[in-house]
């Protein structure tokens, strides 16, 4: 079973817990990272933990939740090998997998109801990458190498 690392900052603990429970219910192995109830945690640090778990192959995929998902997506995309996609609806969730092979999904805990957010997670997980887009992923990897 694939392992999914799920993390959040303090603004999205409830969404993180709902997504972790949903993924466990789907039979996936979940590693849950992030603050406990009432604790504060900055999104760049949680993004780093999940992103590094993915690039180390401790997890195949990651889900990151903060208030808007914006900070998590910005931070996670600083880690080479991460393609983090901030999504708000089933179409962008599906295309994040189909066109971008997003290995991290970012969601806004202050914007999305948990039941809706888990639908977006399912749309992402249940969509296959289309190989015709591989050339652009290679171009992104080249951008990372150019920045070294
Ligand atoms: C924290 O208040 C908030 O800024 C954070 O969760 C996130 O929305 C940032 O993008």
Image: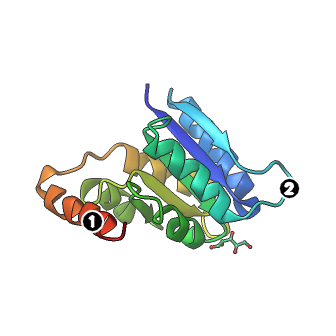
Q: Indicate if the residue with disc 1 has its beta carbon within 8 Å of ligand 1.
A: no
Sequence-first disc among 2 and 1: 2
Displayed quadrant of residue 117: bottom right
In this figure, what is the number of numbered marks? Answer: 2
Instruction: Answer left or right for 90 relative to 143.
Output: right
**Image location of residue 143, percent across then percent down:** 28, 69
Image quarter where ligand 1 lies: bottom right
Which quadrant of the figure has residue 138?
bottom left
The residue beneath circle 1 is: 140
Dot in front, 2 or 1: 1
Q: Which residue of the protein is positioned furthest toward the right in this rendering?
A: 38
The extreme front residue here reads 148
Circle 2 crowding by C-alpha within 10 Å: few under 14, some 14–19, many from 20: few
Q: Quadrant of the C terminus?
A: bottom left
Identify which residue is drawn at 54% across, 37% down.
Answer: 23
Could you say where residue 10 lies in the image, as x and y percent from the top left?
Answer: 76, 60
**Circle number at residue 39:** 2
Residue at x 33%, y 65% (from the top left corner): 144
The residue drawn where x is 66% and y is 64% is 43
Label drawn at residue 73: none
The quarter of the picture where the N terminus appears is: top left
């Amino acid at each position: 079973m694939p392992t999914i690392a799920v993390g959040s900052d303090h603004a999205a603990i409830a969404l993180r817990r709902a997504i972790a429970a949903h993924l466990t219910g789907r039979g996936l192995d979940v590693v849950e990272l992030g603050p406990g109830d009432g604790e504060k945690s900055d999104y760049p640090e949680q993004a780093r933990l999940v992103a590094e778990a993915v690039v180390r192959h401790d997890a195949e995929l990651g889900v990151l939740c903060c208030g808007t998902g914006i900070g998590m997506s910005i931070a996670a995309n600083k880690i080479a090998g991460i393609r983090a996609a901030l999504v708000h609806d089933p179409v962008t969730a599906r295309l994040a997998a189909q066109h971008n092979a997003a290995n991290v999904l970012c969601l806004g805990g202050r914007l999305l109801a948990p039941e809706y957010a888990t639908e977006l997670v399912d749309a992402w997980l249940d969509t296959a990458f289309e190989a015709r887009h591989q050339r652009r992923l290679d171009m992104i990897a080249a951008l990372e190498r150019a920045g070294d």
